[in-house]
Image (tube, rainbow, N blue to C red):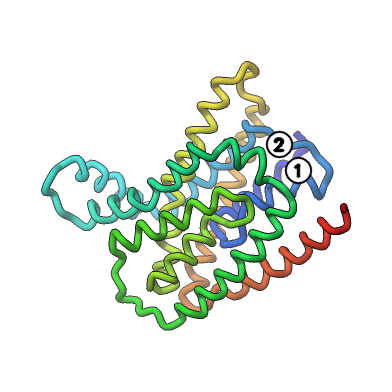
Amino acid sequence: MDLLLLVLLALIQGITEFLPISSSAHLVLFPMVLGVEDQGLGIDLALHAGTLVAVMAYFRNETGQLFRGGVQLLQPGRQSPERTLALQVAVATLPVVIAGLLLREVIAQDLRALPVIATTTLVFGLLLGYADWRGRGNAPEVTLTLTMALLIGLAQTLALIPGVSRSGITITAALLVGLARPEAARFALLLAIPTTAAATLLGTIELLRGTEGFDADPADAATAAGLAMLSAYLAIFWLMRFVRRASFMPFVYYRVVLGLVLFGWWASTL
């Protein structure tokens, strides 16, 4: 694969995966804009693996808590902050796993279309803006509950539609249920750990079931994973600092402009 295209793909995946602007929309649009072929499942898996390592490395303390809490979930009666966090993440992840298994083929075949991406980019960008405006007075001391985690998880199922943005819709839902901006971003990014791991696992199974085996050059895959990991880590680092002092409105403005551009592009092809 051409090195420049590989670098661009990795940067797009790494930067947009955790910012509320939809990585799937950008990755779907990338080959359309440049007129190149789809990068293939092997590169996709490498990109996701890189971003998974990045979010686990940044939230290494929380990742350790999730593993310990997951073990404690198997111990009836055990109570701890680690167990509570693991249970919240599990409750919020279950809906998207079920929806993904049931609707994966429909989404892959019918929803990766330009008008769909333009609509979701614009509509869910405006919804993020509303949630940010409504939640501007959310108190930092609001504690996440299981009910709130479930509501965020149900909202996360919408991220299966290209253009919605997994981080965007979970941040939106977290703001709407009362979390402050930093905690909303933190929980949204923590949810990326099991969802990205599940997507990578499903993709690997699909690849192994295929007849052609791994469809990417190992060197290309390693390069893609490494660059995606680095860019994703820097994006998370910047986002978590940014939301402590500013709103999500810059991302809303970006999505509105991008959505309008996409509608214009779609109209020009009719």
**Please, what is the three-letter code of the amino acid marked with disc 2?**
Gln
Q: Of residues 243 and 138, which is closer to you in this image?
A: 138
Residue 48 is drawn in which quadrant?
Answer: top right
Disc 1 element: helix
Q: Residue at x 31, y 65 (%)?
A: 144
Residue 28 on image: x %, y %: 70, 46
Looking at the rendered image, the quarter that the N terminus falls into is top right
Residue 137 on image: x %, y %: 42, 83
Q: Which residue is mark 2?
A: 39
Q: Which residue is mark 1?
A: 5
Q: Residue at x 44, y 42 (%)?
A: 97
Ranked by sequence position, the earlier of labels 1 and 2 is: 1
Q: Name the outermost residue toward the bottom.
A: 137
**Please, what is the three-letter code of the amino acid marked with disc 1?**
Leu
Vertical position of residue 226 compared to residue 117: above or below: above
Q: Marks 2 and 1: in contact by CB < 8 Å?
A: yes
Going by the image, does 260 lie left or right of 105?
right
Q: Which mark is residue 60?
A: none
